[in-house]
Structure formats: structure tokens, C-alpha cells
Amino acid sequence: MSIGDRHQILDALIEQDACFAIFRLPEEASPRFVMQTSGAAALFNDIEALNGQSGFVIAPFRISSGSPLIVIRPDCTDLTEVDITIRERSRKEATRERYNNIDKAMYDRLFQRFHKPLLQGEIKKLVLSRSKTIGREEAFSPGRSFFRAAEKYTHSCVFLFHTPQSGTWLGSTPEILLAGSGSGWQTVALAGTRYPNSGIISWDDKNLREQHLVTSYLLKQLTSFQIAPEINGPYTIKAGNLAHLRTDFSFSLSDRSKIGTFLKVLHPTPAVSGLPKEEAFQFIVDQEGYDRRYYTGFLGMLDPTAETHLYVNLRCMYIGKSSLTLYAGSGLLASSTYRDEWKETEQKLKTMASIVK
């Protein structure tokens, strides 16, 4: 089966409102596929409900009735076995939509709102994000864009998923939330961003401090489960046109029946929310001005008896009928400036924008 056939099947599954996910793990040659062939996907309102579950998990930043926690049952795991009739998409007139995109002046006002509690010492770190909506060209193919991203971003987890509850999302993320099998498990602290034009990357105090906050948080959370991890880092990794600081935590997970409880303690990490955890999360929900939905949530295969690969949903887009909404954010500290953070989000938006053709 050629890539052409595969991308058409993926597009047809979206048109038919099927529950499926296709994902390519970092450095792997071929993507993995899961699809639920009957019934509705399982919906949950608490991460802890993942205890004892297996399947492809789609978790939002904040669980709500409009953005539930979803688990796709892997009834079919081979895209070549999907029997579907490929029909030419009907030409429909695009719905006229108003795009309420944030310009630099609006972002400056949001930045000042987020920066104030940081300067006052009430909160240590906050992640300010924004979305950018662009028109969807008639020839745009989610399936083709997935394979384009998989070819371009070899060091990241690239994914495309669709369910009736979530809609269609496409993304590329380098950040592991939890991965492992048997006795070997891993999570990472990914924080600090540079967009170098050369191979030489230097890290300033702000980025090093941001990485330290995430590392300290993960170590504290792991310690609360009596886990003493092996730590490697921080070191520099590349993700598309960006560079990040990464620290690896390797450990043994003795009670895999309580992975949901473990994930609830980890999510959301300071890399996508802030510190202190509860205060930062509530501040973002109250003040950011829009619903992140599945951006900065997590996704991937959960199977405590075999392999688990869960990633934080970072560089991504929501694929609508007539528009594409791209997401990006950056971590703010008291030392942050709005110009630097605006530039960082602009660079991050390019990850998904570069595969839209």
C-alpha cells in the first residue's frame, strides 16, 4: 500500500467520523495505527480512571464536558486491513469564519497579566499560550500532512487522531510524559527553548532556571511514590527548527495497575502549566482567555501489560472543516520579556505551519 493510498484512507476515516489514531514514535521507520471498529470510545472525567485501562489515550489540558478524557479501543492495528471505499470529497463552499487571532499588542496585554504574579513572587512559573487560526485550503489532506510531518520530524512523536468527541488533531511532540514496559520506565523534563541559526547553542539563566523548575517538580512527584530515579541531563535536543533542554528520569514502576493515579500526579507538568501546580493551573484557566482543549494535554498508547508511550501534546493543530488552528506557548518567569516570548511562540507555530500545503 502506497503513502497515497494510506493518506486517502486516513482522510476517509475522518470523513466517516471514525475513532482512530496513527502515530510514529521517534526514530521509528513505520507508523503505528489503532482504530475502534464498533461502539463509542470510552470517555472519562478523571485521569485516575485510567487505572486498569488500555488503549490509545487522548487527554486534554483540562477535562470538561466539551473535552473529555478519551480512550480508543485498539480493535484494528493494521491500516492495510481497513476496508473502506475511497470517494472523491464533495466540494462544499467553505463556511465564512472570523479568526480572533492575537496580535502583538493583545499578546503584550496578556503577557503583562501573566507577568504580574511572577514579579510579585506569588507564582514561580506560568506558561502563556496562544492559538492561530488560518484558512483550510480545499486541497489540504490531514493524512498527507501526517506523512509529511513524520518524514520531516524524525526525532519527535508525530500523530494524527480523530474521534467524534475531540475532532481531528495533528501534531509533533518531543516530550515524553510516561513511557516504558516491564520494569523500565521513563519521563522527561523538557523546558527551555532556543531557535538557533547555527550548530552552537548557548543557554541563558532564564532557560536554565526554567529547566531546573521542571526537573525539581518531577523529582518531587516521583519521590512521593517512593521512586528514586536515575537522572541524566540536562542536555540539548533538537525538535524541528528548535532546541530544548532535556533531563531524563529512568525508574522502576512497581504497581502498574495504578498508572492513572501516577499520571494524575504528573499532569500537567510545569513545562505546560506552571508552579505551584494548582495555583498556576487555575490562573491559566481563569486568565488565558481561551480553551486549550487537547493542546498541552497528553496522548498515546497505554498498555500496562505491554508497552506504554504517552507524550505531551505540544506542537499541534486542530483540523476543522474550513480552518486550521495552530497552538504554541512559552514558559514565563519573572525575568521574561514579552518580545522574547512572542518570538518564541512565533517560532513554535512554524512547526505545524511548515507542513500545511
Image (cartoon, rainbow, N blue to C red):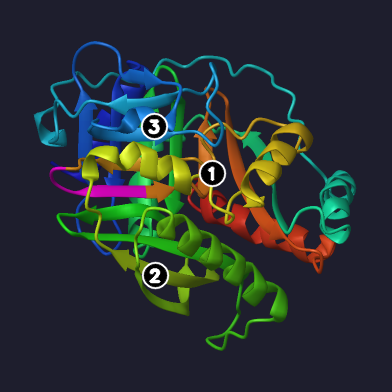
- Comparing labels 3 and 1, the label whose residue is closer to the camera: 3
Say if mark 3 contacts mark 2, CB within 8 Å: no
Q: Residue 235: give x, y in percent of width and height.
A: 47, 80
Q: Residue 224: give x, y in percent of width and height.
A: 43, 54
Quarter assignment of residue 346: bottom right
Of all residues shown, which one is farthest toward the left?
Answer: 81
Of all residues shown, which one is farthest toward the top?
Answer: 39
| Residue indicated by mark 2 | 248
Separation of marks 3 and 1 at Cα, in angstroms:
18 Å
- Count the labels in the image: 3
Considering depth in this image, is 276 or 354 the residue closer to the camera? 276
| Residue 284 versus residue 15 in the image, above or below | below
Which residue is found at the position 47% from the left and 17% from the top? 91
Label 3 crowding class (10 Å Cα cut-off): few <14, some 14-19, many 20+?
A: some
| Residue indicated by mark 3 | 48
Say whether disc 1 or disc 2 marks the residue closer to the N-terminus: 2
